[in-house]
Image (cartoon, rainbow, N blue to C red):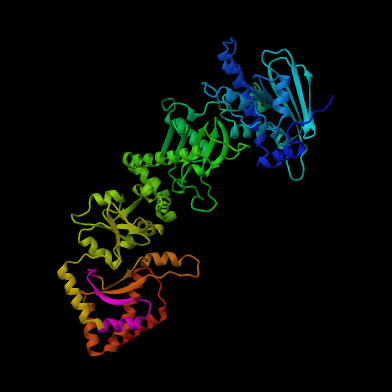
Amino acid sequence: MRTKQFKAESKKLLDMMINSIYTHKEIFLRELISNASDAIDKLYYHSLSDGASGLNRSDFKIRISVDKDGRILKISDNGCGMTKDELESNLGTIAKSGSLEFKKDNDKKEDVDIIGQFGVGFYSAFMVSDAVTVESRAYGQSEAYRWFSKGADGYTVEPCEKEDCGTDIVLHIKESTEDEDYDTFLEQYTIKHLVKKYSDYIRYPIIMDCETRKLKEGSEDEYETVTETQTLNSMVPIWKKNKNEVTEDEYISFYREKYMDYEKPARVIHTKVEGQATYSALIYIPKQAPFDYYTREYEKGLQLYSSGVMIMEKCPDLLPDYFSFAKGLVDSEDLSLNISREMLQHDRQLKIIAKSLEKKIKSELLKLMTEDRETYEEFYRAFGMQLKFGVYDRYGVDKDKVKDLIMFVSSNEKKLVTIPEYISRMKEGQDKIFYACGETADKIEMLPQTELVRDKGYEILYFTENVDEFAVQTMGEYDGKHFVNICADDLDLDTEEEKEQLKEKNDSGKDMLAKMKEAIGDSVQSVRFTNKLKNHPVCLTSEGAVSVEMEKVLDSIPTQNKVKAKIVLEINANHPIADKLLSMYASDENSVGDYAKILYAQARLIEGMPLDNPTEISNLVCDLMVGSAH
């Protein structure tokens, strides 16, 4: 029999398709099952449009059979089949798609959902097989034909016997090598896994005869191996059902099985959208972060399906980074796929879907915050840092999309509050949002500056994560209210009279303060009296954009370019230490130098900062103790 040549550019093109287009060899089974589903769709559609009787959707199926000894894997369908000319046209021409032609002809008609578009999926079979046989009988025809090929050298077509309409694709699986394990494609567990992974939601049953071990009838401990026909796929995707058809238990069961989380999700988002882009989505908001969530190894993304066939395990383009915790899937018929159907072309539909999902996730999180505050706070403790990073990331381009979702511990009752909640209970005339930074809320409350601010009736937001202050500095303000660090130099809570009294005290003590600054050195910008403190003697404040806490964060980053805060040592103008210093300076102006170093060390310890020379401070304290004893 004469071997016919492929009509495309022969061996080079076929080799490229087999070896370059597809990333994973296992994809071949997805492609062949998708083609079988298309063939059934075509026959079923024609049966409806032509008024043919006797054909019911329940009669259609895709069968997989394995002969391990003969190294044969067979995929069969009872769909429309192919004539001799169609075998020549569809399989003899690489990148010729009968499915695409059918879809074009029926694009405006309802109930047409054809997966195959490019006509190359069939040739993925050659990635795992060294010979492919296709036996097909077209619906309504009495003749059947066999197409056979060993690859790029060509193919043959000849008549054959086939009892019913449909197509059988028979693969002779390659022998395994040191680099490739082809034997795995003859194992029933591999077939089951691949069907579940890629083709679980093909609308027709995918069946296979599977060997299972069962107790012998009448025996309690003796087993036998039996062969049973099993359906490998679920067929009806949960996300394609109406919401009122799915119970909460079904949503949770699907989540736990699919995403391996023993916790219930914080929120289930099931949505169907029609318009510029038509898609269905089932998204879950977890309560707990995976162990690798805040590492570089974590991969964000939603599963992407096209007409029930999985295209990508994780599509990162569907989620912004600040919503990377979301798990779930999107199914759309409108996506433009690349030729292998493994990756997306970055097109308009994808961007529309991503933008729509972003709005939906945000609105559902806001609802959760209102309807179930306890659950939202549980979610927020796991993923709040990621949301705050979304405010700060990319110079704040997305800050307005995330700012209403972030929360901080409040000095009022030490509970999490949102920024709008803080603003809603601000004092009359208050135009600043006050915050303070530290390792924990308890440690922040012990800061010297906190005492007076709370005493004046102002609520303080406690920032306990490294990203917090960077995030609010990126925001700058919320609803016209600016964020102010109570440890910064621009706190401005004094009355005009208090400001004047403080100025007079600083002016009268300027020489002593300058002497103290000289003793401490370049570690501080200046030393001055302050009204910010109530009972504590000293504190550190910062001038400019970089605070003391930001310096600690930036110093922890391994880099040669260290960023330093402009630190000011402030002495409580109303504390006995202020008058004591002035008195000592009046009698011996050099005596305040040692006290300045000790007070500065004390202020650094309160801030949780290390001492540059702890030995020197220890010796100074001992010297002063010995001197006072005499």
Horizontally, residue 494 falls left or right of residue 343, namely left
The N terminus, quarter of image: top right
For the residue pair 387 and 23, the one nearer the viewer reads as: 23
In the rendered image, the vertical position of residue 293 relative to residue 54, given as above or below = below
Residue under the point 77% across and 37% down: 11
Image quadrant where one finds the C terminus: bottom left
Q: Is residue 238 left or right of residue 486?
A: right
Residue 549 place in picture, x, y as percent: 37, 65
Residue drawn 58% across and 14% down?
47
Q: Residue at x 23, y 70 (%)?
A: 535
Q: Position of residue 145 (x, y in %)?
A: 75, 19
Residue 316 painted magenta: no
Residue 400 image offset from top left, x and y in percent: 36, 49
Q: Residue 616 sits in which quadrant? A: bottom left
Q: Position of residue 263 (x, y in %)?
A: 45, 41
In the image, is residue 449 above or below residue 247? below
Left or right, residue 471 beside residue 578: right
* Residue 371 appearing in the image: yes
Magenta range is 511-535
- Quarter of the image for residue 190 reads top right
Residue 66 seen in this snapshot:
no
Residue furthest to the left in view is 497
| Quarter location, residue 46 | top right
Residue 525 lies in magenta, yes or no?
yes
Q: Relative to 480, say whether 538 is above or below.
A: below
Number of numbered discs: 0
